[in-house]
Image (cartoon, rainbow, N blue to C red):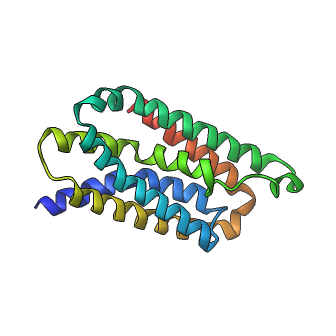
Amino acid sequence: MYFLETLALAVALGCDAFAVGLALGAVHHAPAQVFRMSFSFGFFQFAMPLIGWWLGGHVSRFAQEYAPWIAFGLLMIIGLNMIRSSLSPDKQKQDTSDPTKGWSLMALSVATSIDALGVGVSLGVMHRPVLGPALIIGLVAAAMTLIAVKLASLVSARLAHRMGFVGGLVLIAIGVKAVIT
């Protein structure tokens, strides 16, 4: 039963990675981009419970109070940038940065996995093992991201000119959801 609970938790935590994968995958679905997103989202989903478990009670107050606002800010910035890029002329679109690289990817990875930090804190407080659940959480998030990007790339062939705008709105909505819930 413990495995099924962990798997359900992993799917719940992976929903943000799935949504971001859908938002970005519509425009950014080259094999290298897919790998970077899946690996990074999966790695951060794996690492955050470990960090939360290790930090224990010291970070629990921070994670509960500020994590939603951090996720909101990161997703808002990247979402607005995607909307701006989608509305700019085609000449400028070529000059925009790839959100599957560098600091943008790091910010998205943190924003989509920060709730896993709280899970790690909870596991530490309950004196439960963390390595197995963290591994399952990371693998599920990577798989969900891969599936989302592949689905989005199928849709983007028909709606490519609008997907950057829609993707930006989705990222902003996820950020707002993080603050509200």
Query: Which of these two is toward me, 160 or 140?
Result: 140
Quarter the C terminus occupies: top left
Question: What's the residue at 30%, 56% (across, down)?
Answer: 10
- Left or right: residue 41 versus residue 33 is left
Which residue is farthest front? 54
Residue 115 position by quadrant: top left
Q: Quadrant of the N terminus?
A: bottom left
Q: Does 7 appear above or below 126?
A: below
Q: Residue at x 27, y 37 (%)?
A: 55
Please state the horizontal and vertical placement of residue 37, each as a whole percent of the image: 53, 61
Residue 144, x across and y down, in percent: 42, 64
- Image position of 163 (left or right of 9): right
Horizontally, residue 83 falls left or right of residue 95, namely left
Numbered marks: total: 0
**Residue at left offset 42%, top offset 64%:** 142
Image position, residue 22 (x, y; %): 54, 59
Nearer the observer, 91 or 107: 107
Determine whether 70 is above or below 171 in the image: above
The one nearer the camera, 175 or 141, is 141
Q: Residue at x 47, y 30 (%)?
A: 69
* Image coords of residue 143 (percent x, y): 41, 67
